[in-house]
Image: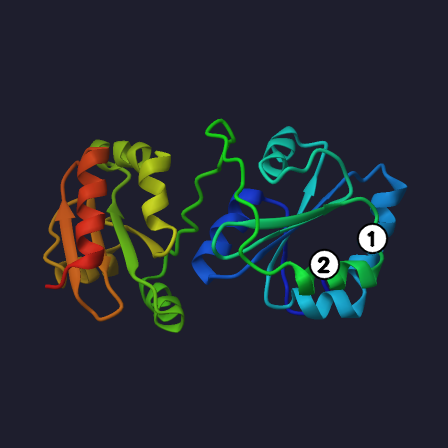
């Protein structure tokens, strides 16, 4: 949909995560592909003035036929389409429902300054766990350096029962939220070069977790961990220095 620098996402959880990582506002367009009004609204969003204002935002299109999307937008007070929602970096939002002209959308984007309303968070809203794993150690650190973010490394092995069970722990929402601001790197013990990367952190076995802060300090812990242990380790590793 966007003809400039804004990639368009159709996964709310992914868009929400990127917004937090990149500290950008989230622009959501809620539509039905069967609606003529929605088709006209999309053409207005594609206009150059609107696209210029969206260039520094995460853009997400949600289709009403996918049931979870109905709940995603409901937390922002949206119950019909077409609608636009602007979620600010502080988590508050502004929204408008109904067909809007390009001028109307640009005015909305220009005047919807934070803080806005607080979303009506529903714990039953499904949020997909997406670590967006990097499999390349050096690439993970390139991204982290560019964005000044910590790196989270998870060392695993397909033949390790403990490592495989750790994925279940990492998929818990209360654990996964700790990694919203990290570049996440998944390294397999079975690939020989990865073992060289492990030794510099004092890791000799899997599963193992390593947090490398932007200043180069790092913390590592190996062996099977409960969710409570992972949470405690990550919180401590991000704030302390070694």
Quarter occupied by the C terminus: bottom left
Q: Residue 143: percent from the left, percent from the top?
A: 39, 67
Q: CA distance from mark 2 to mark 1?
A: 10 Å
Residue that badge 2 annotates: 108
Q: How many marks?
A: 2
Q: Is residue 103 visible?
A: yes
Q: Quadrant of residue 138?
A: bottom left
Q: Where is 214 relative to 194, above or below?
A: below
Label pair 2/1, CB-CB below 8 angstroms: yes
Q: Quadrant of residue 226?
A: top left
Colour mode of the rendering? rainbow
Residue nearest the observer in this picture, 31 or 128? 31
- Label disc, if present, on residue 212 of the rendered structure: none
Seen at 60% across and 31% down, the residue is 71
Q: Quadrant of residue 211?
A: bottom left
Residue nearest the observer in this picture, 10 or 47? 47
Residue nearest the observer in this picture, 173 or 186? 173
Residue 213 located left or right of residue 141: left
Q: Residue 88: percent from the left, percent from the top?
A: 54, 56
Quarter occupied by the N terminus: bottom right
For numbered disc 1, what is the local secondary structure? loop
For numbered disc 2, what is the local secondary structure? helix
Q: Find the residue positioned furthest to the right.
A: 36
Q: Is residue 160 visible?
A: no
First in sequence, mark 2 or 1: give its number. 1
Q: Residue 12: percent from the left, percent from the top?
A: 57, 44
Sort mark 2 into few (<14), some (14-19) or many (20+) by Cα contacts within 10 Å: some
Seen at 44% across and 44% down, the residue is 130
Sort mark 1 into few (<14), some (14-19) or many (20+) by Cα contacts within 10 Å: many
Seen at 30% across and 61% down, the residue is 150
Q: Residue 179: percent from the left, percent from the top?
A: 34, 49
Residue that badge 1 annotates: 100
């Amino acid at each position: 949909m966007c003809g400039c620098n804004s990639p368009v996402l159709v996964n709310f959880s992914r868009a929400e995560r990127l917004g937090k990582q990149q500290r950008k506002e989230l622009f959501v367009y809620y539509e039905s592909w069967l609606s003529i009004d929605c088709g006209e609204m999309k053409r207005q969003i594609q206009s150059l003035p609107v696209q210029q204002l969206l260039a520094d935002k995460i853009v997400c299109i949600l289709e009403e036929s996918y049931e979870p999307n109905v709940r995603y937008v409901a937390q922002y007070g949206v119950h019909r389409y077409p609608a636009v929602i602007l979620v600010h970096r502080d988590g508050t939002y502004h929204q408008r429902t109904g067909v809007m002209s390009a001028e109307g959308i640009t005015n909305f984007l220009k005047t919807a300054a934070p803080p806005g309303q607080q979303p009506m968070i529903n714990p039953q809203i499904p949020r997909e766990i997406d670590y967006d794993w990097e499999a390349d150690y050096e690439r993970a650190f390139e991204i982290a350096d560019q964005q000044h973010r910590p790196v989270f490394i998870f060392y695993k092995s397909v033949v390790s029962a403990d490592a495989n069970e750790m994925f279940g722990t990492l998929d818990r929402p209360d654990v996964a939220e700790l990694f919203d601001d990290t570049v996440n790197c998944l390294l397999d013990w079975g690939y020989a070069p990865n073992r060289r990367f492990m030794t510099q952190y004092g890791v000799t076995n899997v599963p193992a977790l390593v947090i490398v802060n932007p200043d180069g300090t790092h913390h590592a812990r190996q062996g099977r961990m409960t969710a409570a242990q992972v949470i405690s380790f990550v919180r401590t590793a991000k704030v302390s220095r070694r």
